[in-house]
Amino acid sequence: MKKILLLTLFGAFLTTNIYANWFASEPKKSSKAIDNSKIYTLKLAETWPSNFPIFGDATKNFKKLAEAMSNGRLKIRIDSKNKHKSALGIFDFVKSGRYDLGHSGSYYWKGKDINTLFFTSMPFGMTSKEQYAWFNYGGGQQLMDKVYAKHGMKSVIGGNTGNQMGGWFQKEINTVADLHGLKMRIPGFAGEIMAEVGVKPVNIPAGELYTALDRGTIDALEWVGPSLDLRMGFHKVAPYYYTGWHEPGSELQFLINLKKYHSLPADLQNILLAAMKLSAYQMSNQSEFESAKNWASMKKAYPNIKVKTFPEPVFAALRAANQKLLKKLAASNPLAKEIIKSQANYLQKARAWTAISDQSYLNSQSK
Ligand code: CA
């Protein structure tokens, strides 16, 4: 039954005229007869440890979909961090061909190519819904292709975490001055923005974060949101849970070695992309589901968690720092400038619509 549903879904997916956008180009048609006896085994390396919830489910779903849709002609072997030992080695693994596929986050590679930064989520940027529209219809996938082609790879949407929370804080933040000298685990571009307003971003391995927050080695940290924060237990040791601004819709990525991709029969290439995009969609739904469920149980067990939003002067300082750093990035290379411009132009249009649709609707529900 499940298989029929899956194939029907896939059929519906392929017969709609939206696929040109979803695939960034028209799916290729096979010119040769399909050789059903030939099995293609593809190795996938993921950043996550074995059995990591949600993110790890995305690769398991992808494997199931790709193998079912190809009627077993594709075999996917997943190696987690426990096996390959290098959470942040995925870019090099796939680029070099040691692995055919990867599952990770594009913003981890900013040290290798700064232009990879833009394809996860940008502070004060698009929500996941807006960003998917940009990826699939607003030129985002084409820009991502341009960045990754230089490295012999293709990056495909890999599932969204939804709006991430601003993090767990030991003290309330009332003014910009309250951020001065604050030791916070906040990686990436958001960490650079925080540094501009006086925060001291610190880098601590995931396994040591709870103790660091509990003992005061750090004053604050951001992780994801209730979907993955619950299991970390931060709500037991920090009273303030700030709402998000820095990762409004973090998209993971699948990476494909282009040489390997082009060596596959056309129908398997299409199946690979379709399976990635369907599993990304599943993960995005799962993130929303788990966040709502976990937030309900967190609130019930710890009714004193104080949900806070930074006051406007703090946001104003963060927005100014963001603009300053984006300007610097745009000046650093033409492709960065092109991506920043594409995102800003699209966001302006998308947000005007969000304001009179979702935002107005949600406002009508509040007391
Ligand atoms: Ca985060």
Image (cartoon, rainbow, N blue to C red):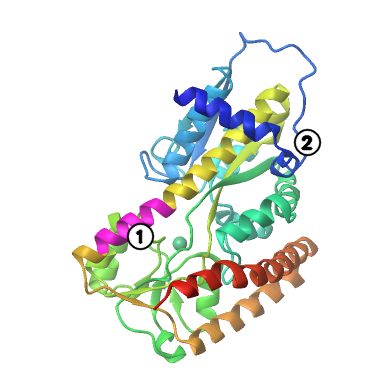
Does the segment drawn in magenta span residue 241?
A: no
Residue furthest to the top in view is 37
Q: Nearer the viewer, residue 65 or 193?
A: 65
Q: Secondary structure at mark 1?
A: helix
Q: Secondary structure at mark 2?
A: loop
Residue type for callout 1: Pro
**Residue 111: % across, % down:** 60, 58
Residue type for callout 2: Glu
**Residue 324: % across, % down:** 66, 80
Calculate the distance from the C-alpha at mark 2 to the C-alpha at mark 1: 38 Å
Residue at the (72%, 52%) spot, across then down: 137
Disc 2 residue crowd, few under 14, some 14–19, many 20+, Cα 10 Å: few
The residue pinned by badge 1 equals 226
- Residue 60, picture quadrant: top left
Is residue 112 visible in this depiction of the protein?
Answer: no
- Residue 331, picture quadrant: bottom right
Q: Quadrant of the N terminus?
A: top left
From the image, give the main secondary structure of the stretch colored magenta: helix
**Residue 25: % across, % down:** 77, 40
The residue pinned by badge 2 equals 26
Q: Nearer the viewer, residue 136 or 333?
A: 136
Q: How many marks?
A: 2
Is residue 36 visible in this depiction of the protein?
Answer: yes
Q: Which residues are magenta?
A: 288-298
Residue at the (29%, 67%) spot, across then down: 212
Disc 1 residue crowd, few under 14, some 14–19, many 20+, Cα 10 Å: many
